[in-house]
């Protein structure tokens, strides 16, 4: 299989990847806002039982604020801020669990503890996995993001049947555009895009001679899988210089 690290570490792909990271940070930011609103609501309700539960409300406000900040400034440091607030919420839930155990002698973890732990660990693991892109994300200019989006949108405005240099996966979620020196792949959601040379693309294909070409790629933001129908597979083989499969004759 292909050298994924080398493929996605190239300058042009590193920039496209950084744009994808921004999208992901914003998505997590929206999750943070929702989680913050939920905790604000719980805090208001729990304050009726004990004034100390104002901490839940305050932490909910902090989480909502961190989520809003992630939408405005989609950088990895904002992701770390969300993780910090999430762990504060987790710490509060653990404190409440211990306090109730001390009073009642019963260990009764609630759903809030479980989901807060998943949220906190999930954000932190995502931050650690993408931390090597911190500078690439920070260095992105508004013009670079705008130009990249325009290119991706332009490809999705085209009709594959009218474009001899354009292919589409069987599920119509990814398009592959042939360039002079390689290929450009972009997903329908415009959050995943990268370039590859012919050799790199060929190395990503499991069985180039198969009737229906399939690809599995370890993309830094999540594994990708592509399948092409027989006609598109034949065209892709021609572009890559692969011998077509031999059909048996009677």
Image (spheres, rainbow, N blue to C red):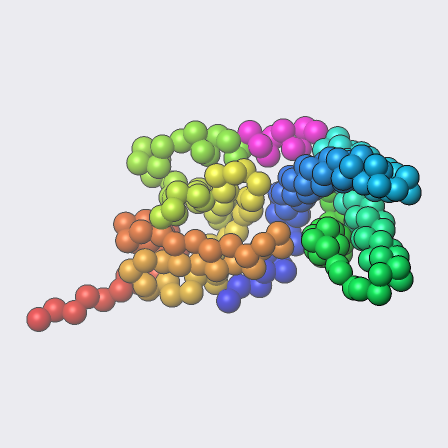
Lateral position of residue 115 relative to residue 223, left or right? right
Taking 87 as reference, is 105 above or below it?
Answer: below
At x 74% / y 45%, what residue is drawn?
136
Residue 98 visible? The answer is no
118 or 26: nearer the eye? 118
Q: Which of these two is toward me, 210 or 50? A: 50
Judge by depth and name the residue closer to the eye, 59 or 157.
59
On the picture, is 73 further left or further right than 4?
right
**For residue 137, which quarter of the picture?**
top right
Q: Percent from the top left, x then y, of residue 206?
A: 42, 65
The rendered magenta stretch, by its main secondary structure, is classed as: helix
How many marks overall? 0
Q: Is residue 26 magenta?
A: no
Side (left or right) of 110 relative to 164: right
Determine the residue located farthest toward the front in the rendered image. Answer: 104
Q: Residue at x 84, y 61 (%)?
A: 104
145 in the magenta segment: yes
How far from the left and from the top, in percent, is residue 156?
45, 33
Q: Quadrant of the C terminus?
A: bottom left
| Front residue of this view, candidates 185 and 172 | 172
Q: Position of residue 65 (x, y in %)?
A: 80, 34
Residue reaching furthest left? 250
Give me the residue at 31% from left, 51% from top: 229
Judge left or right: residue 168 versus residue 114: left
Which quadrant of the figure has residue 222? bottom right
Q: Which residues are magenta?
A: 142-150
Residue at 73% x, 51% y: name it: 112
From the top left corner, tell me how far across and down residue 227 is, in percent: 39, 54
**Residue 183, can we see it?**
yes
């Amino acid at each position: 299989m292909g050298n994924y690290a080398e493929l996605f570490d190239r300058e042009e792909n590193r920039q496209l990847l950084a744009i994808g990271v921004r999208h992901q940070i914003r998505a997590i930011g929206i999750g943070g806002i929702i989680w913050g609103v939920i905790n604000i609501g719980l805090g208001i309700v729990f304050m009726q039982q004990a004034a100390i539960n104002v901490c839940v409300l305050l932490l909910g406000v902090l989480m909502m604020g961190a989520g809003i900040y992630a939408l405005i400034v989609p950088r990895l440091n904002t992701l770390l801020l969300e993780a910090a607030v999430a762990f504060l919420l987790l710490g509060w839930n653990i404190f409440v669990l211990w306090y109730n155990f001390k009073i009642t002698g019963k260990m009764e973890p609630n759903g809030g503890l479980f989901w807060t732990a998943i949220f906190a660990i999930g954000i932190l693991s995502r931050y650690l996995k993408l931390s090597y892109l911190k500078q690439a994300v920070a260095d992105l200019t508004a013009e670079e993001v705008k130009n990249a989006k325009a290119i991706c949108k332009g490809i999705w405005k085209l009709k594959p049947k009218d474009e001899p240099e354009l292919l589409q996966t069987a599920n119509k979620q990814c398009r592959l555009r042939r360039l002079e020196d390689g290929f450009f792949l972009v997903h329908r959601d415009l959050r995943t895009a990268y370039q590859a040379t012919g050799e790199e693309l060929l190395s990503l294909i499991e069985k180039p001679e198969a009737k229906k070409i399939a690809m599995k790629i370890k993309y830094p933001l999540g594994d990708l899988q592509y399948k092409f129908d027989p006609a598109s597979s034949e065209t892709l083989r021609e572009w890559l210089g692969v011998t077509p499969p031999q059909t048996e004759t009677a």
